[in-house]
Amino acid sequence: MKSDYISIDQLDPFGSNPPITLVHSAPEDTIGALSLPLDSALRLRDELLPEIFLDALLVRKDSDVLIVGFHGALNQEKTNLPRFERLSTVLKYPVSSIFFGDPALWKSRDLQLAWYTGWNGLDLQRVIADWALAAAKLVGAKKLVFTGSSGGGFAALQISALIPNSYALVFNAQTDIANYRINGTGFGAQRTFVNVVWPEIAADFKHHSDIESPAWADILGSRSSAVERYAQPTANHVFIVQNVEEFHFEDHFLPFLDAAKKGGNISRVKMKTYLDGPVHAQPKADEFIEAFEEALHWIEGLPLTLLD
């Protein structure tokens, strides 16, 4: 299958300039049939619905590690889709990488966060897992590291759990969508999420306060909760990094650790905490870099995700 690519040194800061290669069928057949030389990059796109795109940027280096990146909440008045978060930082390291944009954000400019769940009829977490495995085979990677912060950290936890011996490096991650509160109080993110992405859920609401009950997320099953998913046995490894001074520490970090213990997964969970004030935010560059380098060192002695 023909693919167009550019050299890494030609990439713009947003990863927006490689030619787009369309993906229409099973990723193992389409992505696996592409050609991508070392030190090159290409864009992948699947039109899931009319004008609704799953976008990815794939970068190949001489490495057995593939970093799989996800973005957090986006203000679409200030950010163009797709967003490939931490691109410039990850490019400084000798690792291959693939960055995904959340396709649900194409549904409405009012939507800032959709947690990469997909929608009714599309299990996006499974789709991205398949894309990541196909991309790893294309670039010759043997270890997959899923990473993101906040809502992107939620996606990394969830998708890594689907792939045995993969790794998740997450920062200040939500671990249960229904229990997320903006600034520890508001439900606006979930309200927009169900109105735009899951209208069948919103249609069942009888009262404005129905969004405050976690029962609405039952239709998503474990897709909506890493707490639920990790309360059952998984076969991946997690490095979870948390600012202890903000509300995610009690609302998401501690419940996740309790779930990992319940599911028998805690021996494969590495923890790191830091102090950065009471506001929920992405880690600063130095905090991200320190944990990223620690994660790369950590996985050196751990099992391969893909075997020959």
Image: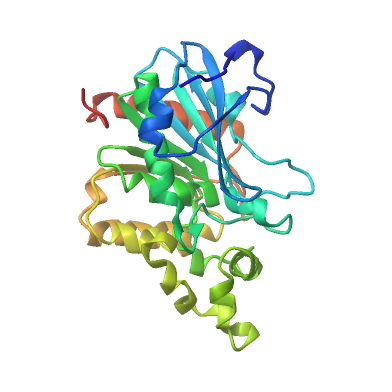
In depth, the one of 159 and 131 nearer the eye is 131
Name the residue rendered at 47%, 11% in the picture: 37
Image quadrant in which the C terminus is located: top left
Q: Position of residue 143 (x, y in %)?
A: 32, 28
Is residue 208 visible in the rendered structure shown here? Answer: yes
In depth, the one of 17 and 247 nearer the eye is 17
Q: Is residue 269 left or right of residue 153?
A: left
Q: Position of residue 294 (x, y in %)?
A: 40, 29
Residue lying at the far bottom of the rendered structure:
206
Q: Position of residue 31 (x, y in %)?
A: 43, 29
Count of all numbered marks drawn on residues in the image:
0
Residue lying at the far right of the rendered structure:
77
Image quadrant in which the N terminus is located: top left
Q: By what rule are the colours in the image chosen?
A: rainbow
In depth, the one of 302 and 66 nearer the eye is 66
Q: Is residue 63 above or below residue 220?
A: above
Name the residue rendered at 62%, 88% in the picture: 207
Kindly indicate the quadrant of the structure image that contains residue 256: bottom left
Name the residue rendered at 65%, 84% in the picture: 208
Is residue 272 visible in the rendered structure shown here? Answer: no
Q: Is residue 211 left or right of residue 1?
A: right
Q: Is residue 157 above or below residue 252?
A: above
Q: Is residue 10 above or below residue 275?
A: above
Q: Position of residue 10 (x, y in %)?
A: 65, 13
